[in-house]
Image (spheres, rainbow, N blue to C red):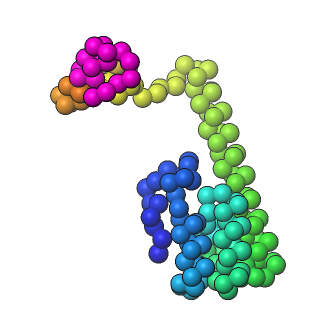
Amino acid sequence: MIDTDLGLSGKESASRNRSKELGAEVSLGHGGPGFGTEASRLAHKNSDGDHLLDLAAVFNTLIADHDGVYDPRLYPDRLLLGLKGTMREAELHLLKMRMEEGRMRQIERGELRQGPPTGLVHLPNNQVAQDPDDQVRQMNSLLCEKYWQNPGPLSV
C-alpha cells in the first residue's frame, strides 16, 4: 500500500514520489498485482506512467483497476493503459480550461471574490476587517513593525 502522498497537492509532482516508490517496489519483485481505483492515475505524468508500465512488463506485474486487470506485456492491455493515461491528461487540460473560463466570467460580472491577505477576513456584508484572532493580529503587527524598521529582506 503506497499512500505517502495522500493530502498533497497534485499540482506539482516534485513532492509526490508515488510512481517512483511503486516502480522501485515492482523492480524488487515485492508484491503481486498493482491495484488502484483508476489505472490512468498510476503516475502524475505520462512519462512516469510509461516507465512504470515498462517495469511492470519486465517484472511480470499485473495492473488492476475498477475496469479490469491488465497485463502490460500484452499489446492490447498496454495500448489501453496508454490510452487511459492520455485521456486523463486531456481531461485535466479541459477541466483547467473550463475553470479558467468560469473565473473570467466571474470577473466580467464583477462577482469574483478572492480570499483576503493573511490577517484579514471577509465579513458577511462584503467588508474586509482584521482577523478576530488575537494571535493572528499580534503576528501581523510584529511583522509590520519588523518590516518598517528595516524595509529590506524580512528577518524575524
Q: Is residue 109 above or below residue 81?
A: above
Q: At 28% from the left edge and 13% from the top edge, which residue is drawn? A: 149
Q: Quadrant of residue 52?
A: bottom right
Percent of width and height locating residue 8: 46, 53
Which portion, as a residue range, is magenta? 141-156
Percent of width and height locating residue 72: 73, 79
Q: Is residue 148 magenta-colored?
A: yes
Q: Quadrant of residue 54?
A: bottom right
Q: At 72% from the left edge and 70% from the top edge, which residue is drawn? A: 81
Q: Which residue lies furthest to the right in this view?
A: 75
User: Residue 82: in sight, yes or no?
Assistant: yes
Q: Is residue 150 magenta-colored?
A: yes
Q: Which of 23 and 37 is in front in this view?
A: 23
Q: Is residue 99 above or below residue 30?
A: above
Q: At 42% from the left edge and 29% from the top edge, which residue is drawn? A: 115
Q: Quadrant of residue 57?
A: bottom right
Q: In this view, does 69 lie above or below 131?
A: below
Percent of width and height locating residue 119: 30, 26
Q: At 76% from the left edge and 65% from the top edge, which residue is drawn? A: 83
For this view, does 141 lie left or right of residue 74? left
User: Residue 125: in sight, yes or no?
Assistant: no
Q: Nearer the viewer, residue 99 or 5?
A: 5
For this view, does 122 lie left or right of residue 79? left
For this view, does 61 lie left or right of residue 138? right
